[in-house]
Amino acid sequence: MKTNPTDLCEASNAEKQPTTTVDKKPNGKSQIRYMKRITFDASCALLFAAALSLIPSHLGFAQDVVVTPKTTDAVSTTTSGNITRITPGAISIQAEGEAHPLAYNITANTKFVDDQNAPVEMQNVKTGRAVIIYYVMEGENRVATKVVLRNAP
């Protein structure tokens, strides 16, 4: 029997043709790889979010800022001298050893008292009076917390 070479090609092509139809659904191995990929991507996203939450705010990432009032106990310091000037918001005294008068801010919380710690009327607070000023530093400002008039009449 004589065979034609083209017949051999057709026969070999026929053998290479799949005999079953291809499913449109992925097989079991493909589904497992797909699920692993989704799980890996979700895990990476969660780790990235957790890492971002650990970055300190001073590195420049935007964050909501909540400002709370400062509640530290300030250290009170005293200065004694004679009043050189008094205004509604400040008092200046010439302290011993100082070349220039020192200025102190007066607030609504500043107390004016005599040597016995009794309240003093503001009309009795005049230039030239000897005082002891208790104050705290707020930044570079001296803020008077208590002014004691010495040798009050």
Image (spheres, grey):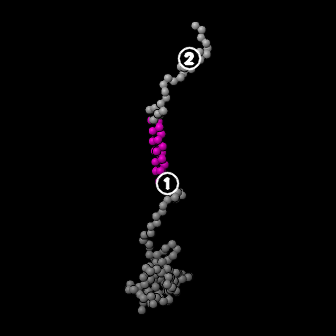
Give the label on residue 55, or none. 1
Instruction: Identify which amino acid the numbered label 1 is placed on.
Output: Ile
Q: Residue at x 47, y 30 (%)?
A: 23
Between disc 1 and disc 2, the foreground one is 2
Q: Quadrant of the C terminus?
A: bottom left
Q: Looking at the image, which is closer to me, 71 or 48? A: 48
Q: Main secondary structure of the magenta part?
A: helix
**Per the image, is 41 magenta?**
yes
Q: Report which residue position mark 2 lands on.
A: 11
- N-term mark: 1 or 2: 2
Instruction: Identify which amino acid the numbered label 2 is placed on.
Output: Ala
Q: Looking at the image, which is closer to me, 21 or 106? A: 21
Q: Residue at x 51, y 76 (%)?
A: 141
Magenta residues (range): 32-56
Q: Residue at x 46, y 88 (%)?
A: 125
| Whether residue 43 is situated above or below residue 28 in the rendered picture | below
Place of residue 93 in the rendered image (x, y in percent of width and height, measured from the top left): 51, 84
Q: Residue at x 53, y 19 (%)?
A: 15
Give the label on residue 37, or none. none
Kindly indicate whether the residue at mark 2 contacts the one at mark 1 (C-beta within 8 angstroms). no
Among the 4 quarters of the image, the one containing residue 120: bottom left
Mark 1: secondary structure: loop
- The reply to whether residue 78 is visible in this rendering is no
